[in-house]
């Protein structure tokens, strides 16, 4: 696994959120948000969740999608709701404690203000994101990457929570302090310098926050259970794309059901979104 290449891809994902937000606005203008649904897999959830975040934080936020399904998401569960850290580090957990005018909150805490329903499709045994497997967790534990450092507040140049710095070890340029109020700097910090300190959303059950419906039900689907049958093999991180429709019909029909599109040929006893 090339950790640096993974992090470059992560940076691209963070920076791709704005074009997706613009597209969602266009779709809303044409169809109305009630007819727009959003589905993302693995790292694609950085793009999808951040697009909703940009809208939620805007001056005049509006509903953008009817339902958002985050499937096997390769991003910290703590970015959505308070989750017990499994790998605490002496570095601020910006995913779980991001500074806001009303105090620190999970970074994506408010994305349910622009999406009617959110669903976490997770696999606790997922090869790519499960905390005991040397993939996503290994990548997170390696941060800050070479060329990035974290330092607590400098008493002569204070910045709340300390600073992340690009040291430019491969050039003669001086070190650059990343300004987390600038989106491109923040996304660079998330990609190369800030370690996730919780499990990935795609492997974590019972994540509340935006996945808790207004009625108090938790929208989640455990892909390791029942007819879904997702395992811990590398293949099954993308099982829904690797098998044919007959093999993965329960997954796709549950997805359609979460989008309120109906039309399932299976009964509700065979096919239902798990709520707790």
Image (tube, helix red, strand yellow):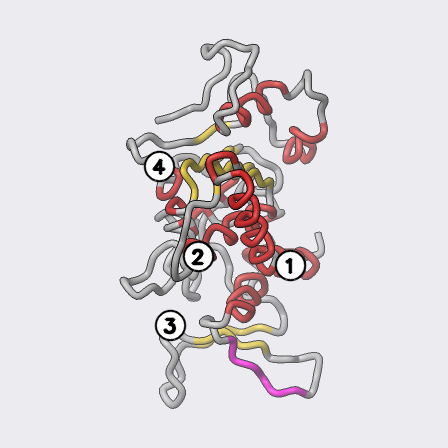
Q: Separation of disc 4 and disc 3 at Cα?
A: 30 Å
The region drawn magenta spans 173-178
Point out which mark residue 212 bears. Answer: 4
Q: Separation of disc 1 and disc 4 at Cα?
A: 29 Å
The residue wearing badge 1 is: 12
| Badge 2 element | loop
User: At 49% across and 55% down in the image, what residue appears?
Assistant: 196
Q: Earlier in the sequence, mark 2 or mark 3?
A: 2
Q: Separation of disc 2 and disc 3 at Cα?
A: 13 Å
Q: Give percent across and percent down for residue 267.
A: 49, 9
Label 4 neighbour load within 10 Å: few <14, some 14-19, many 20+: many
Q: Earlier in the sequence, mark 4 or mark 3?
A: 3
**Quick check: is 174 in the magenta stretch?**
yes
Q: Separation of disc 2 and disc 4 at Cα?
A: 19 Å
Chief secondary structure of the magenta portion: loop
Tell me: 243 left or right of 61.
right
Asked if the residues shown at circle 2 and circle 4 are in contact, with their CB atoms under 8 angstroms apart, the answer is no
């Amino acid at each position: 696994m090339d950790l640096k290449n993974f992090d470059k891809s992560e940076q691209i994902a963070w920076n791709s959120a704005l074009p997706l937000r613009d597209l969602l606005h266009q779709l809303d203008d044409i169809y109305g948000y009630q007819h727009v649904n959003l589905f993302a897999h693995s790292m694609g959830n950085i793009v999808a969740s951040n697009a909703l975040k940009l809208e939620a934080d805007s001056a005049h936020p509006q509903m953008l999608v009817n339902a958002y399904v985050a499937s096997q998401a390769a991003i910290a569960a703590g970015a959505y709701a308070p989750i017990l850290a499994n790998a605490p580090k002496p570095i601020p957990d910006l995913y779980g404690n991001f500074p806001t005018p009303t105090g620190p909150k999970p970074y994506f805490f408010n994305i349910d203000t622009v999406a009617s329903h959110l669903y976490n499709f997770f696999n606790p045994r997922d090869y790519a994101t499960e905390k005991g497997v040397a993939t996503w967790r290994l990548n997170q534990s390696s941060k800050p990457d070479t060329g990035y450092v974290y330092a607590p507040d400098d008493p002569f140049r204070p910045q709340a929570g300390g600073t992340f710095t690009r040291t430019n070890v491969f050039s003669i340029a001086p070190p650059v302090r990343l300004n987390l109020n600038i989106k491109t700097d923040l996304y660079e910090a998330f990609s190369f310098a800030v370690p996730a300190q919780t499990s990935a959303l795609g492997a974590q059950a019972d994540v509340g926050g935006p996945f808790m419906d207004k009625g108090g039900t938790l929208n989640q689907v455990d892909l390791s259970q029942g007819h879904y049958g997702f395992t811990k093999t590398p293949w099954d991180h993308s099982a829904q794309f690797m098998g044919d429709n007959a093999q993965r019909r329960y997954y796709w029909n549950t997805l359609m059901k979460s989008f309120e599109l109906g039309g399932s040929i299976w009964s509700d006893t065979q096919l239902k979104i798990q709520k707790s």
